[in-house]
Image (cartoon, helix red, strand yellow):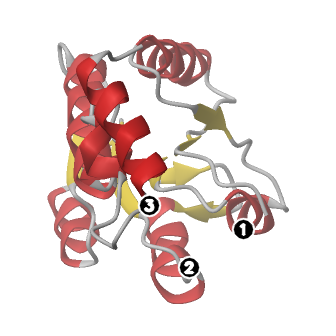
Amino acid sequence: MTKQEVAIVLNEREAFKQETAETLQRQLSEHNITATRIPVSDTLFDEISLRTPRIVVLDYILGDLTTGLDVQEFIRQQLESQCSCFFLTDEYSTTVAVSALKNGALDFLDIHAPQSITLLTNLIRNEMQKLTPPTMRPGTPLSMWVADAPQSKLTQTLLDRAIKNPP
């Protein structure tokens, strides 16, 4: 089971949505966030289970197969890991948006809205910060990596040197 950070599940049979998925994946990559595009197919639910993403970006209409609401419900009920959902769709409906948000989606964005990809990238970055423990974030002081347990003199000396002379 591989741990992916973001899974993008858009109905990429439409050229515009394929371009949108590529743009989102590229923007996330520029922020060191791994994003994988999962094709809409009969194995969609298996792919999501296998990848166990931390965040999923969903379209509402996923071809003839299912809807984003069904995928969101599957994630909520079947995956043991914490997984956040965002909707990015051109099938904007207040009823669907309310259902998605009631079921735990963090946002429901219109794919055609200006700056929607940039906004979603920022929302994902913020959510990743919340999901990442402070000691695992880049730039965390080395002293945060060390437990409060008693240390040998050698360990303490090495730690002191590393703090004074960071790499």
Residue under label 3: 152
Q: What residue is drawn where x is 27% and y is 63%?
A: 105
N-term mark: 1 or 2: 1
Q: Nearer the viewer, residue 67 or 163?
A: 163
Q: Which residue is mark 2?
A: 74
Which residue sits furthest bottom? 77
Q: Residues within 10 Å of mark 1 (few under 14, many from 20)?
A: some
Q: Amino acid at mark 1?
A: Phe
- Which of the two discs, 3 and 2, sits closer to the camera? 3
Residue 81 x, y percent position in the rendering: 51, 75
Residue designated by label 1: 45
- Residue 18 in percent (x, y) is at 60, 20
Q: Are marks 1 and 2 in contact (CB under 8 Å)?
A: yes
**153 displayed left or right of 12:** left
- 14 displayed left or right of 109: right
Residue 95 found in image quarter: bottom left
Residue at 44%, 61% in the rendered image = 152
Q: Earlier in the sequence, mark 3 or mark 1?
A: 1
Q: The residue tagged with tag 1: helix, strand or loop?
A: helix
Question: Which is nearer the N-term, disc 3 or disc 2?
Answer: 2
- Residue 110 shows in this picture: no
